[in-house]
Structures are given as C-alpha cells and as structure tokens.
Amino acid sequence: MDPVEPILDTETRRRRRRSLFRHRRVPVRMLVPNFFTLLGLCAGLTSIRMGIEGRYDLALAAIVFAACLDGIDGRIARLLKASSRFGAELDSLADFVNFGVAPAFLIFTWGHGDFKSGGWICVMIFALASALRLARFNAALEDEKPKWQSNFFVGMPTPAAAIAVLLPVYISQLGFEEIKAPWALSAVLIYTLFLAFMMVSTIPTYSGKLLGERVGREWVLPIFVIAVGLVAMLFTYPYQTLTALTLGYLAFIPVSWRNFRERCGEQDEANAEAEAAGMVPASVTGVEASASSEPKTSGTGRIFTLRPPQEPPK
C-alpha cells in the first residue's frame, strides 16, 4: 500500500469538513465580489443565446464584458479582504461557462457548424481544455513557489483563450468574408485546436498580477491615459481593437516564455550559490532543511508538501 495514500485521504476529509464561511453571520462585503462573478456569468449565458440567434456582435460584446468582470472581481475581493472558498469555486464555474462553453458555441454557430461532427468535436475539445486548465489552476493554488512565478500563468488562461479563439469572428465582422471560405475554415479549425493545446500546456504566459501591486508615481497619469484610450478604442473600433490586442498577445507569448526561462536560470544560479555557502535556497522556503533524504527538484520544478495527519487528543 502506498504510504502517501492515508495522508491524502486525511487531508481530503479535512478539507471537505471545512465550512464555506468561518462565521454564521457573513459580512456584506463578502458578497460584493460574488455579485460581479454572477453578473459575468449572466453575460456568458447571454452570449450563448445571442450566438444561437446569429447576433454575433452582441455575443462578442457579452464575452468581452464577462472577461472585463473576471479581471476585476478577484482584485475587488483582495481589496475588500472578501476572498472565500465559495467565491473561488463560483469563479471557476463561471469561467468555464463564460470562456469555455460560450466561445465554443459562438465559434460553432459562426463557422464550425459547416463541418458538422468535425466542427463539434473541435469546439468540444476547446471547452474540455478550458475545464482542465481551470482544474489544474485550482489544484496548484497551494503549491509552494517563488513570488516572481506569480507573474506567470502555466499555459494560456481561459479568458485570454476565449478572446483569442474569436479572432476569425472579428476578421469576419471587419468585412473580410474570405475568412468563411472552405480552406480558411479548415485553418480556423487548426487554430482552435492550437489554442486548446495552449491552455493545457505548460508554456508560461504573463499574468500581470505583480504589476497591480505597486505603480511608480511617474506612471500614474500615463496609465490613466492609456486605460481611457483603450476603452474608447474598444467602444469606437471594437473589432479592430480586439484584432490588434489578440495578435499582440499571441506575439508576446514567446517573449514571456524566454523571460520565464531566464528567471529560472537566475534562480538556479542563486540556489547553487546558496547551497555552496551552506544556506537554504529561497525556493524552498517553508520546507525544513533537515529533510535532505527527500528527492530534490531543480529550480524550475515545484515542491509539494503534505501535511501530516494530526494525532487525536489523548
């Protein structure tokens, strides 16, 4: 019998017994982030309806609106100190509907439906990849890792994949009807499968989480101007703006990958110097240095710690 299995069973039972909220009376501020999450979920469900009816402009607007709400509900929860297990689970379910199911329905009704079963299999793979991506993200929340790795996602996040997979629809709305030619739709199928692979891959992509912690004083006003200009462009020239943002994001993925590898190399060198000096590397903070008998991983790997079962009181 695997000696790790009893520890995993004990940890699983402990988490299942843990209540969603710590107190009987929940503060109102704990509900605010969930309202934004539910509003985004309503937008995703509305997008499915608009896509079935062929109203692609409203369907696209609903998905973009859901992506904007998804980007602020987590930050609102941290600002209000209203993070909860319930909110995290609700956010994951909303993300699957908004950025897995809704884009799959929209791209299927737009062009993949011409391939019938082949197109349905393609969009189904995309939706399943988004579910697997979210499950892996939730499972890795408690992993021990350096702080700088919080600035990177493992694989493409589901909101970015949902916006990127609709690139053919943006091009079609710009008046390029050649995108609906049979050979072009075949390329769109491959493009959809490529984004599904990107979601379940381990290719690092920028998350921008650390950018929201501190901003230089000289960047405050330029950031306001850029944000207002981006919103104005999105309302005035929506399809041109979404096309440019999507292409820019896809082109930036190799840059983030190279930056991640460089940071990993720097961390390996720092760990090697710390070990040579007889110090505990920063990447294993929280792990006892006496556990030298356990297998070590490289600087790029993750260290998983298991909480031993608590002994019953005597």
Image: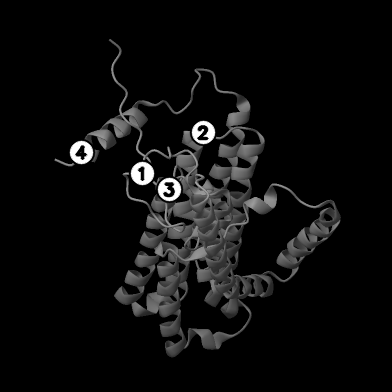
Cα separation, mark 1 vs mark 3, equals: 24 Å
Q: Which mark is residue 140?
A: 3
Dot 2 corresponds to which residue?
84
Disc 1 or 4, which lies upstream in sequence? 4
Q: Amino acid at mark 3?
A: Ala
Disc 1 or 3, which lies upstream in sequence? 3
Cα separation, mark 1 vs mark 4, equals: 19 Å
Q: Which mark is residue 115?
A: none
Q: Residue at the spot x=57%, y=48% of the render? A: 147
Q: Nearer the viewer, mark 1 or mark 4?
A: 1
Q: Are marks 1 and 3 in contact (CB under 8 Å)?
A: no
Disc 1 or 2, which lies upstream in sequence? 2
Q: Nearer the viewer, mark 2 or mark 4?
A: 4
Question: What percent of the width, then of the height, locates residue 24?
Answer: 49, 17
Q: Amino acid at mark 2?
A: Ser
Residue 17 in view: yes
**233 left or right of 140?**
right
